[in-house]
Image: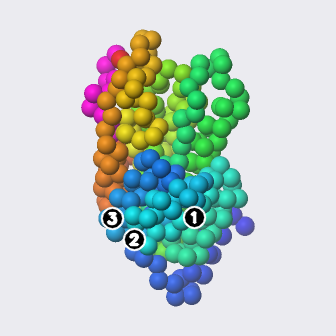
Amino acid sequence: MSQASEAGQAAQAAQAEGQQSPSRIALVTGAGSGIGRITARALGRAGWTVVLTGRREDALKETAAEIAEPWVLPADVTDEMAVADLFAQLTARYGRLDLLFNNAGAFGTPAPAAELAPAQWRAIVDVNLTGAFLVAQAAFALMRVQQPSGGRIINNGSISAHVPRPNSVAYTATKHAMTGLTKSLGLEGRAHRIAVGQLDIGNAATEMTERMTQGILQADGRIAVEPVMDAAHVASTVVHIASLPLEVNVPFMTIMATGMPYLGRG
């Protein structure tokens, strides 16, 4: 049986049992830290019922402490069976999914392409690309058969989806690939009222970008401090896009610290 058929049967069974799902269900991956944590809390404040997933249950519970009626469901997005179980539980409880913030990702250890170990390459690709695909695939399968059908997927891209940083071949390659994933799903989603978009983020202040404030390698070989922005602005952007009707999509949006070296020649 296909994933879509299983999702459809599960959603119908939930509805047949008289299950009363809240009006808006959001799933946030990588919700245990950084942008995922801040966005999950912002969605909660905006009235969404938020399902939190990530590998570390303790970190997810810290995020959940500031959200009304959250649901913590630990899962490794790189594990196909774990993702299937995540969506089976979500479907059994709510019968639908209205928003996926496909956020889980990793940068890895910076290294020149000639020195990057294959295992390091695979680790980044597994999380940033394969993991993003597996979760988006499961969300898409549910959204197209739930009643009413449709939903929104927001993929977390990066400024690296446009231009690379030095020594970031794996991360940059996956974020370019995320753009292709967004475009393909967006095209397929038209027939099912599924709006798919991508938020390309530059220098939001999180654990991942802390080194920006201390000096980071530039394209010309200099080490320079870069400006960062409050990650709350990313979260508010996700909340705004999520509030739009499904007849409106934001295929791509870039949000970045104004002074970061992105526009121009470095």
The quarter of the picture where residue 256 lies is top left
Residue 36: x, y in percent?
Answer: 45, 51
Is the residue marked by circle 2 packed among few (<14), some (14-19), or many (20+) residues within 10 Å? some
Give the vertical position of 182 relative to 64 (above or below).
above
- Stretch in magenta: 255-265
| Residue 15 in view, yes or no | yes
Q: Which residue is mark 2?
A: 68
Q: Are marks 1 and 2 in contact (CB under 8 Å)?
A: no
Q: Which residue is mark 1?
A: 73
Of 56 and 166, which appears nearest the observer?
56
Residue type pointed to by label 1: Leu
Residue type pointed to by label 2: Ala
Of 91 and 118, which appears nearest the observer?
118
Q: CA distance from mark 3 to mark 1?
A: 20 Å
Residue at image coords 71%, 32%: 119
Give the vertical position of 20 relative to 117 (above or below).
below
Q: Which residue is mark 3?
A: 45
Residue at image coords 66%, 62%: 84
Give the vertical position of 25 relative to 235 (above or below).
below
Q: Which type of secondary structure does the marked residue at label 1 adopt?
A: loop
The quarter of the picture where residue 8 lies is bottom right
